[in-house]
Image: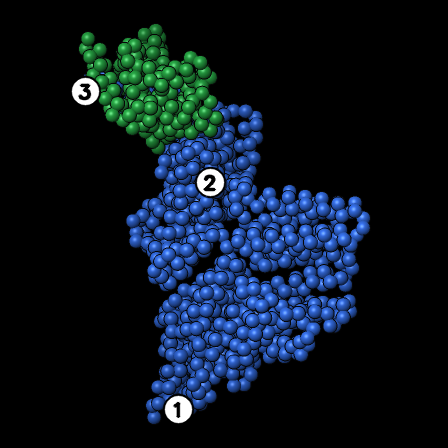
Chain colours: A blue, B green
């Protein structure tokens, strides 16, 4: 080949020595050698060379403490004090990005000759795609491995940091098998336009390739691409493929609007696996699309509208009530400024003008702003805090809601007097959101105190007092005193005429739930249907209260043994609640729990266990792993696992339940009993008959304190004890117990149909 | 003269600002690519270079440049200037101050040879442009801009067939000039 041909061959010139010499002479990069100092660190060896620089392993040894880090050595960036200040600011933000799945930024600076450097937590491990291949992980394991990375990105986005360069080589798996995301926002920190625009071929979103600045949507695209690469050629469920495709959609508007929406859908793919056999019909696609939208944001947007309306209505009232025009103007200005400057601009800090609203975060963030902005207008602040508190409570953010409502009560009491309706309502709202165990104890006393104040201020016939009484009955329910609960609700119903329709629906609902727990399924179903009709009439079919009455109907259907009907309705309710409240809202999780339970009763313990696991995991995360509802989900999960023959896993679930219950000795009788009952059942299933007999006897003693004589739960425990004895030490006594229990049971259905069948065999043997 | 050649002429003569910006951006992008090449992540790729350069050029408001295709044509030509200037600097250094370089490694020797060849090619292209400017524009795009035949056609506002014909013709004419 002649020199001319070689030169003319496209692409050849740039591979040649001339271009290399051009680059080398004009832009030298100083390399570091072992022993050289970078800030307080000393280089140990080179780890890698990447698109943005060279990475060295380095060690800090300044006498204070030892620390091994990865130092990222970047090319010389632009100079200038302003740039350096920006670099420092951004470094500060990154250093605050503390998340178990983000490699922490330890230090950073600029060398004398202009190189920027970052010291990051050193993650010793393989890139996530290689790790997954080496370990031959299943698609499910791969998704589980990457899920925390999506959470990490979500976490960072919440702090207004985008990554810009998510790719497999930036996700390393450490020795404990934890995936960690490296290089968060480093590109932004270099304060170098060229580096900002730089991207890794194959891992840049379409708009990034077209030169748009990096944003949240770009990170979502890169997460999708990450999943695509890490899942590789593995056969994955159609739902998962659809999730990845949505994340990687060509235009940002088609993608998940947030990392949390992507995470929720991935969690759904994991949890929904048994039902993923749905045909990939149009309906399913539509469903997927609907579900893929930010449910919280949807509910949140409505809440926002409602909230703004509250404030606007309040302004109007004030203007009417007070003649002082000046005062009204001041209030209007203050409230408007609050809405426009503090609330609304936060709707999407990253992409102005888009519809992606994380209202929950927004409202929570607005709390402090209320205090600052409206410090000299306590009445306005109180009203806004009341609105905020209700919105936050509706979104399941109980801690923040409690804070807002507490402030509202104090501010409104100071300005309007302690007996004012709004103060009493703020106090009631605050009581209603107490679901934690410790708070539950104080709740009933607080409610009684509130009732006393309310009766003194507005009279015993006021509708608000009926609401307070309803809360008192609920308090009895929450501490598992179902008889008292029923008595209190029944007493309320005698005051029928003075009670508004919405409150009446709430009362029928509470009554139904307590009756169901007492085993009176027939009135429970009737009252649940009454509550449903009243609520649908008053507030519409998708109103939260109407949805809850749906749950009560399912509960009663389950108690009546109409499991298949209950399952069908529950699937619908879970979807509706998920859309209305979000996937992790306590109410949604109640329905998820119930669906798992009912499926198990309907003879499908394998799918039941999947839902119950989701309920347990999410309740643990949202309410805490020592919450009685978490324990309850674990206990019922154990029942499903026993039903599907997975005894080891059942034992694990029961241990988790016991650990949770041990955190609060005393209360939580129902969860405690469910755990004990299933422990006994587990022993029976494992052939440990003596243990089983002993455990059933203990459970019987506990149950007698909760349930009235003749309750089916007692019968089923006796039946279990009889079975254990009949297979163990005392077959004759066992058989007597079994025959007796079967007689009392008659043909009433029970979730433990398998046990009843076994009992019938024992009874049949002469 | 084709329309694109006219445009190029205008850019060069009338709006020196645009031309200078293209050159400055290319230098900048080269620097960035250099870091990547040094870091061992990529080999230098002229196509990526001009594409990324366009993104940043367009970002700053594409004054004086009609569109992306037009930019590629301009950038390809600017790239030729950058490389030719470097080759001349290198050869001048070799002749004038060779003593300063005490050791010559293989890369240096190869670079000197390529510099020599490139300076000759640049002269040949200047000569060829007097006969048919279009031939040289095609060579610029293909060799210095790393553009494909189709991209070259877009950049110069010619049909693909014409580009293929001109590309073959240019190679033949250059070979003939070398042998003459």
Q: Position of residue B4 (x, y in %)?
A: 36, 19
Tell which of B1 and A611 is nearer to you.
Answer: B1
Which subunit holds the residue at mark 3? Answer: A
Q: Is residue B80 above or below residue A476?
A: above
User: Mark 3 Cα within 10 Å, few/some/many (few <14, many 20+)?
Assistant: few
Which of disc 2 and disc 1 is earlier in sequence?
Answer: 2
- Label 3 and label 2: CA atoms lie apart by 47 Å
Q: What number of labels is visible?
A: 3
Tell which of A321 and B99 is nearer to you.
Answer: A321
Residue under label 2, please give it. Answer: A163
Residue under label 1, please give it. Answer: A732
Q: Position of residue A619 (x, y in %)?
A: 51, 62
Tell which of A587 and A764 is nearer to you.
Answer: A587
Residue under label 3, please give it. Answer: A1
**In the displayed structure, does residue A188 sit left or right of residue A399?**
left
Q: Residue furthest right?
A: A324
Residue beneath the point at 58% across and 68% down:
A537
Residue beneath the point at 41% across and 26% down:
B67
């Amino acid at each position: 080949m002649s020199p001319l041909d070689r030169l003319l061959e496209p692409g050849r010139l740039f591979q040649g020595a001339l271009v290399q010499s051009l680059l080398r002479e004009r832009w030298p990069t100083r390399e570091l050698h072992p022993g050289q100092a970078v800030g307080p660190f000393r280089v140990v060896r080179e780890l890698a060379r990447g698109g943005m620089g060279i990475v060295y392993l380095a060690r800090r040894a300044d006498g204070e403490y030892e620390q091994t880090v990865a130092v990222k050595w970047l090319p010389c960036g632009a100079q200038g004090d302003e740039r350096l200040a920006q670099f420092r600011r951004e470094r500060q933000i990154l250093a605050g990005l503390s998340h178990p799945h983000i490699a922490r930024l330890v230090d950073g600076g600029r060398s004398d000759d202009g190189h920027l450097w970052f010291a990051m937590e050193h993650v010793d491990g393989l890139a996530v795609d290689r790790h997954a291949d080496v370990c031959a992980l299943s698609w499910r394991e791969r998704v589980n491995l990457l899920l925390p990375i999506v959470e990490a990105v979500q976490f960072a986005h919440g702090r207004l940091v985008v990554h810009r360069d998510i790719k497999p080589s930036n996700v390393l798996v450490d020795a404990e098998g934890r995936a960690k995301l490296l290089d968060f926002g480093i590109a932004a920190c270099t304060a170098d336009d060229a580096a900002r625009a730089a991207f890794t071929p194959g891992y840049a979103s379409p708009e990034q390739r077209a030169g748009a600045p990096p944003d949240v949507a770009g990170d979502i695209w890169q997460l999708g691409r990450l999943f695509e690469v890490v899942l590789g050629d593995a056969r994955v469920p159609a739902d998962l493929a659809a999730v990845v495709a949505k994340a990687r959609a060509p235009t940002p508007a088609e993608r998940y609007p947030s990392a949390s929406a992507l995470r929720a859908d991935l969690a759904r793919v994991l949890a929904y696996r048994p039902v993923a056999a749905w045909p990939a019909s149009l309906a399913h696609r539509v469903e997927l699309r609907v579900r893929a939208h930010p449910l919280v944001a949807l509910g949140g947007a409505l809440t926002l509208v409602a909230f703004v309306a509250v404030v606007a209505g309040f302004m109007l009232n004030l203007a009417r009530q007070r003649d002082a025009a000046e005062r009204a103007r001041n209030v209007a200005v203050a409230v408007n400024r609050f809405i426009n400057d503090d609330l609304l601009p936060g709707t999407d800090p990253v992409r102005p003008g888009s519809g992606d609203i994380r209202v929950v975060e927004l409202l929570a963030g607005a709390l402090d702003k209320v205090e600052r902005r409206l410090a000299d207008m306590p009445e306005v602040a109180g009203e806004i805090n009341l609105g905020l508190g209700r919105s936050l409570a509706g979104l399941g953010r109980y801690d923040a809601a409690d804070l807002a409502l507490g402030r509202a009560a104090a501010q409104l009491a100071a300005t309007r007097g302690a007996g004012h309706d709004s103060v009493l309502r703020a106090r009631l709202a605050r009581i209603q959101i107490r679901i934690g165990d410790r708070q539950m104890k104080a709740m009933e006393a607080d409610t009684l105190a509130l009732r006393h104040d309310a009766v003194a201020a507005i009279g015993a016939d006021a509708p608000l007092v009926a609401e307070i009484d309803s809360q008192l009955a609920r308090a009895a329910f929450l501490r598992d005193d179902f008889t008292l609960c029923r008595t209190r609700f029944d007493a309320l119903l005698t005051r029928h005429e003075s009670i508004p329709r919405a409150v009446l629906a709430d009362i029928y609902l509470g009554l139904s739930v307590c009756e169901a727990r007492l085993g009176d399924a027939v009135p429970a179903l009737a009252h649940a249907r009454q509550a449903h009709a009243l609520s649908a009439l008053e507030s519409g079919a998708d109103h939260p209260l109407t949805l809850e009455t749906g749950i009560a109907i399912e509960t009663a259907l389950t108690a009546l043994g109409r499991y298949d009907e209950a399952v069908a309705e529950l699937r619908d309710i879970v979807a509706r609640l998920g859309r209305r409240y979000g996937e992790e809202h306590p109410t949604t999780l109640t329905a998820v729990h119930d669906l798992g339970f009912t499926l198990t009763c309907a003879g499908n313990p394998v799918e039941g266990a999947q839902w119950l696991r989701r309920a347990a995991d999410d309740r643990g995360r949202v309410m805490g792993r020592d919450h009685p509802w978490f324990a309850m989900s674990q206990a019922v999960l154990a029942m499903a696992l026993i039903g599907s023959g997975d005894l080891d896993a059942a034992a694990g679930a029961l241990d988790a339940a016991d650990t949770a219950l041990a955190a609060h000795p005393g209360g939580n009788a129902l969860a405690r009993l469910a755990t004990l009952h299933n422990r006994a059942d587990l022993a029976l299933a494992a052939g440990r008959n003596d243990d089983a007999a002993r455990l059933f006897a203990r459970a019987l003693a506990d149950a007698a304190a909760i349930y009235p004589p003749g309750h089916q739960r007692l019968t089923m425990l006796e039946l279990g004890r009889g079975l254990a004895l009949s297979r163990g030490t005392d077959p004759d006594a066992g058989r007597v117990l079994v025959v007796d229990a079967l007689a009392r049971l008659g043909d009433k259905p029970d979730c433990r149909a398998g046990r009843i069948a076994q009992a019938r065999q024992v009874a049949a043997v002469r | 003269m084709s329309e694109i050649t006219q445009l190029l002429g205008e850019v060069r003569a009338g709006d020196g600002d645009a031309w200078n910006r293209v050159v400055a951006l290319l230098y900048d992008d080269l620097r960035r690519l250099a870091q990547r090449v040094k870091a061992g992540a990529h080999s230098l790729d002229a196509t990526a270079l001009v594409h990324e350069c366009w993104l940043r050029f367009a970002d700053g408001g594409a004054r004086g440049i009609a569109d992306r295709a037009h930019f590629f044509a301009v950038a390809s030509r600017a790239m030729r200037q950058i490389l030719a200037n470097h080759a001349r600097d290198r050869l001048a250094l070799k002749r004038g101050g060779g003593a300063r370089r005490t050791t010559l490694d293989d890369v240096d020797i190869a670079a000197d040879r390529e510099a020599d060849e490139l300076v000759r090619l640049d002269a040949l292209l200047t000569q060829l442009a007097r006969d048919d400017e279009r031939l040289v524009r095609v060579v610029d795009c293909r060799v210095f801009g790393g553009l494909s035949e189709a991209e070259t056609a877009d950049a110069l506002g010619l049909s693909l067939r014409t580009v293929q014909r001109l590309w073959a013709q240019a190679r033949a004419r250059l070979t003939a000039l070398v042998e003459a």
